Image: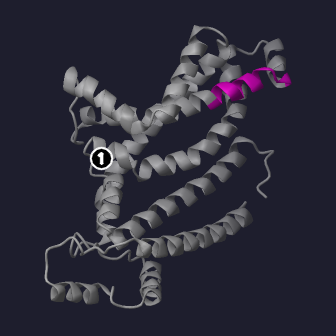
Amino acid sequence: MLKFILRRTLASFLMLFILVTATFFVVKLLPGSPFTSEKMQAGSKEILYRYYGLDKPVWQQYFTYLGNLLQGDLGVSYKLRSVSVNSIIASAFPYSLDLGLRALAFALTAGLILGIIAAYRRGKAMDTLTMLLAIIGTSVPSFIIGFFVQYLFAVHLKWFPVAQYESGWHTVLPTFALGLGMLATIAKYTRTSMLEVIQSDFVRTANSKGVSKLAIVTRHQLRNALLPIVTLLGPMVAMVITGTFVVENVFGIPGLGRHYVTSIQNLDYTLVLGLTVFFAAFLVLMNLLVDIVYKLIDPRIKLE
């Protein structure tokens, strides 16, 4: 296990290096600059270019950025003057983390329950409703769902606040909008996995021994059906916890996603790079944890 973790960690650092390099040069290829939209004299722009090191060759800027990155310094935002990217992430991440955990808990709990019920009610009304939900959840973008529930439950019915993120009541609609797609995917995969496990020999053996239905589902069927779900959870967790861009914008949540969108629009190079590095590191970590959880769920799996 330790050897596997060390090997994957080294591969993860290599992956991050490639991603940072590619993102850095792609951002530099974008037309314009962080200061072209500002009404200032040419001399002032030259001073800003020199201050931020943008007057130097691209390769020199690249190595300077890598050196700072190795020290944990993600740079300073070009638009939010004198505000570091580290502080922006530190202030915005708690909002994304809270929303992401709520959406993940909602999707995982409801998705597993619906998937199990659909498998045991195959071909019946509950199975049909679950599959319909899966189709809607996976085909309709989360921002469309967000706009719909925002208009219906906040604007029209006035049951919930329209936007912002100030209390638990404010979190209901964005949690639903962000979690519905994951819920649908988890329910669909759980149903498929459960249908395969239900026909297994060890399930028939447990039934013949008089083991209760609940014990069979929780101890035998669900544990074996979880492997495909665990595969999905790695990128899902990274995505929802680091911020879903459009949903946060729809509900006015000051999370990482909102900063990512505005940083791209403003050509804020350092903020784009910093958020990309943070997101990529989180994704790599989640995938590593998924491989380890594989081994815990099913000891027969060899971590090669």
Residue at 58% from the left image edge and 8% from the top image edge:
125
- Magenta part of the protein: which range? 189-201
Q: Position of residue 213 (x, y in %)?
A: 69, 15
Q: Is residue 136 visible?
A: yes
| Up/down of 27 relative to 232, above or below | below
How many residues crowd mark 1 within 10 Å: few (<14), some (14–19), many (20+)?
some
Q: Is residue 46 left or right of residue 176?
A: left
- Residue 108: give x, y in percent of width and height: 52, 33
Residue 30 sits in quarter = bottom left
Residue beneath disc 1? 249
Amino acid type, label 1: Asn
The majority secondary structure of the magenta stretch comes to helix
171, 24: nearer the viewer: 24
Which residue is rendered at x = 54% and y = 26% of the image?
Answer: 135
The relative height of residue 7 versus residue 234 in the rendered view (above or below) is: below
Query: In the image, is 204 to the left or to the right of 160?
Result: right
